[in-house]
Image (spheres, grey):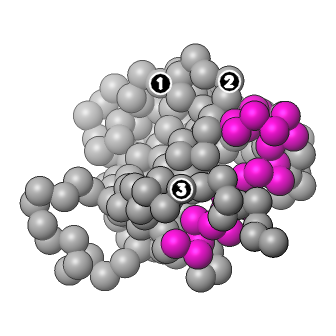
Amino acid sequence: MGSRASTLLRDEEIEEIKKETGFSHSQITRLYSRFTSLDKGENGTLCREDFQRIPELAINPLGDRIINTFFPEGEDQVNFRGFMRTLAHFRPIDDPEKNKDPNVSEPLNSRNNKLLFAFRLYDLDKDDKISRDELLQVLRMMVGVNISDDQLGSIADRTIQEADQDGDSSISFTEFIKVLEKVDVEQKMSIRFLH
């Protein structure tokens, strides 16, 4: 008897997902199995509540922000392909020399796309910049009540002061990239998916 995952995912779909995300056939099959186990409604999609049942996300202070990244604007369901597109941001980066073809779009797990993903976790109002208030909200999510509001404000002010190059009192994506240029994003934003 075959697994539910392999019987419901057609080979053409697997090939398309492989091209789009860079995951291997066995990784896609394994992640499909995980997807279907999370799909409590058994309708081929996941809702926010399905994600909130994942213990690692439930205890993560940024869990809700991470969960929101799986859902396109205005959507409350995500299908397997959308699920895989989001997970692809966390694939370790392959040898950059392999992707020199200018006709091929930048992979979802490129350094730039990983940074954009992280930037969007902070850009709560989606205006393409991180304001002091947004930074404060995310810091508050991460540290809870362990640090006073004055200390958090000080951290936010110092962060913006160091990152803001154009004097608009916010952090643009370009400034965000510059601040993180020496950070090993490839390591910090990668999950080792079993083959």
**Which residue is more in the foreground, 106 or 142?**
106
Q: Which mark is residue 76?
A: 2
Look at mark 3 in the image and give the residue it sits on.
10
Question: Disc count in the image?
Answer: 3
Q: Identify the residue at horizontal 20%, vertical 80% (top origin).
A: 97
Q: Residue 126 carries which label?
A: 1
**Which residue is more in the foreground, 101 or 95?**
101
The 10 Å Cα crowd at callout 1, few under 14, some 14 to 19, many 20 or more, is: few
Disc 2 secondary structure class: loop
Say if residue 168 shows up in the picture: yes
* Residue closest to the far left: 102
Q: Identify the residue at horizontal 26%, vertical 34% (top origin).
A: 166
| Occupied quadrant, residue 145 | top right
Residue 123 spot, x, y in % from top left:
51, 32
Mark 1 vs 2, N-terminal side: 2
CB-based contact (under 8 Å), mark 1 and mark 2: no
Disc 3 secondary structure class: loop
* Quadrant of the rendering where the C terminus is positioned: bottom right
Say if residue 159 shows up in the picture: no
**Which residue is more in the foreground, 44 or 50?**
44
Residue 46 spot, x, y in % from top left:
73, 37
User: 169 above or below 11?
Assistant: above
For the magenta stretch, what is the residue range? Answer: 25-48
Residue 183 spot, x, y in % from top left:
45, 69
* Quadrant of the rendering where the N terminus is positioned: bottom right
